[in-house]
Amino acid sequence: MKIVHIDPACGLDIPPKNWGAIEKIIWEFEENQRKLGHESTHKLAGHIKPGEFDIVHCHVANLAIDLKNRGIPYIYQLHDHHVKYYGKESSTFKENLEAIEGSLISLMPAKWLVDYFNHPKCIYFAHGVNTNGFYPESTPKLVPKEPKLLMVANNGMGGKNGHDRKGFSYGVGLAMLRNLPLTIVGPKNNQNWINENLWVLNYPKLKFIWEPSNADLRQVYLDHDIFLHPSELEAGHPNLTLLEAAACGLPIIGWIEMETDFFGMWRSPRNIFDMERGLDDILNNWGKYIKDSTKTGIDFSWENRTIELLKIYNQVL
């Protein structure tokens, strides 16, 4: 099969050097498709000719519309799950809907997005994780006396820097409630949220790591004990950082509206007291959470996700 992924043209490298979630997803699909004997590459939308590829897989709505207008059949994969935040009257929703309508089939990263668009071409398709780059230590961790908490996130959304999409305030609140160390990792645009929430800087056990390389990120996970993910909007699917944490064997406290089979996680609403109950449950059942989170990482490996994706390709050929 001859496959092309449409470069999102965001100015980031493929494979990504540091940050770039869509770029990371494209690269993982390319690598694993080639391993399975297929031709797979990425190109800018304007460089694609009709009939040049068996499968054209587009990851950005406006580029999908360009393909539609040029008469090139494509599969669309939505990654901007913030579309619900903007509302159905927004240009963001309308652009994505047009991309969906023109597609052969459209892959949604959350089941609630399938319901939100309510279009027959939409199906649920979860993200994956690179289990060659993210994996647990050979010796399982013992129950920590003072568990080190971790959040890895890009908190920006919709130009509103103070909007706490990733739930940083809940992570800091839980850490303060139990007097535990917390590290927040991510791009420097997270500083915008901090500037509007200066109270968090009063907590002496709060640490920041800005823009670690992909090569260093695994060690960041391994240096911590429990991953916090009280995120909204994207909480209907396992996002990349959630899967990376699981693949590294970290128990997770995440929002309750996770819809998919995801083991090793205490499902919690955005409530620090419920998160605290999750913390205690994890510490009291440490071995089970470690085992279950590691299993989740394997289940959602990019190898397994690519096999499922190829089945979808074959359905539309």
Image (tube, rainbow, N blue to C red):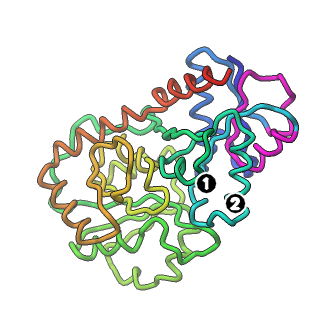
Q: Nearer the viewer, residue 72 or 288?
A: 72
Residue 25 lies in what quarter of the image? top right
Q: In the rendered structure, which amino acid carries the disc numbered 2? A: Thr
In which quadrant of the rendered image does the C terminus lie?
top right
- Separation (CA) of disc 1 from disc 2: 9 Å
Q: In the rendered structure, which amino acid carries the disc numbered 1? A: Asp
* Position of 220 relative to 248 (above/below): below
The first of marks 1 and 2 along the sequence is 1
Horizontal and vertical percent position of residue 24? 59, 42
In which quadrant of the rendered image does the N terminus lie?
top right
Is residue 60 located in the magenta-colored stretch of the structure? Answer: yes
Q: Residue at x 33, y 79 (%)?
A: 203
* Part of the protein shown in magenta: 44-69
* Position of 311 relative to 246 (above/below): above
Helix, strand or loop at mark 2: helix
Q: Do callouts 1 and 2 mark residues in contact (Cβ within 8 Å)?
A: yes
- Frontmost of labels 1 and 2 is 2
Q: Residue at x 51, y 63 (%)?
A: 210
Is residue 279 located in the magenta-colored stretch of the structure? Answer: no
Horizontal and vertical percent position of residue 214? 52, 46
Q: Which residue is drawn at 62% across and 37% down?
A: 26
Q: How crowded is mark 2: few (under 14 residues within 10 Å), some or many (20 or more)?
A: some
* Position of 37 relative to 74 (above/below): above
Horizontal and vertical percent position of residue 254? 34, 57
Horizontal and vertical percent position of residue 147? 22, 60
Q: Can residue 238 be seen in this view?
A: yes
Q: Which residue is the site of mark 1?
A: 80
Q: Which residue is drawn at 43% across and 32% down?
A: 301
Q: Which residue is the site of mark 2?
A: 92
